[in-house]
Amino acid sequence: MKNFATNLVICFFTLLLSSQINATGFFGNSDSEEQSNLMAEAIKYAELAKTHKAHPEEIHEYAKMSLEYIKKAEIQAIEHDNTQERTHITESLRHLVEAIKHARMGHARIATEYIDDALVAMYQLTNN
């Protein structure tokens, strides 16, 4: 009976400690959660850029912010050697760069079209 009680106490503390470690993200998905958060922010700013169809200055600013988050997501994908995600991220990057370029030239309509294309690539990434 003494061994049973000792084993029970050991099991209890093991469960307690492992749940604390797992809750802090020590074992796992903190990187994928961080990448999801980065993509959510990128999508949010791209959507904001899209709402300013007639204002190239706002498109430019929001597209730049979206681009920053996409670049961080790309770094995460590279670190984890995730080729499929990198494909969609590269597409998003390319479209955002073009949107920024056209917004800087005052071509709001063309910039918005590139934002739409970037969003398609971003949504494909989040749906995988």
Image (cartoon, grey):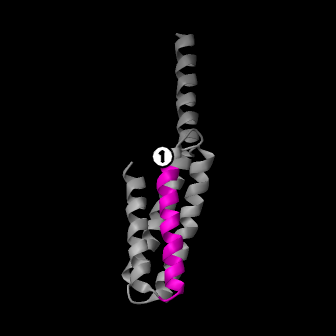
Q: Determine the residue positioned at 43% across, 89% down.
A: 55
**x, y percentage for residue 37?**
49, 59
Q: Mark 1: give few (<14), some (14-19) or many (20+) Cα within 10 Å.
A: few
17 vs 60: above or below: above
28 vs 13: above or below: below
Q: Determine the residue positioned at 54% across, 24% down.
A: 11
Report the number of numbered marks: 1
**x, y percentage for residue 63?**
50, 75
- Of residues 110 and 92, the one drawn nearer to the viewer in this rendering: 110
**x, y percentage for residue 102?**
50, 81
125 vs 108: above or below: above
Which portion, as a residue range, is magenta? 85-106
Q: Is residue 2 left or right of residue 126?
A: right
Quarter-of-image position of residue 34:
bottom right
Query: Principal SS element in the magenta part?
Result: helix
**x, y percentage for residue 107?**
45, 86
Residue 30 in magenta?
A: no
- Of residues 2 and 53, the one drawn nearer to the viewer in this rendering: 53
Residue 86 in magenta?
A: yes
- Report helix, strand or loop for mark 1: helix
Q: Is residue 73 left or right of residue 54?
A: right
Kind of residue sitting beneath label 1: Gln
Q: Determine the residue positioned at 52% across, 31% down.
A: 15
- Of residues 48 and 84, the one drawn nearer to the viewer in this rendering: 84
* Residue at image mark 1: 84
Quarter-of-image position of residue 80:
top right
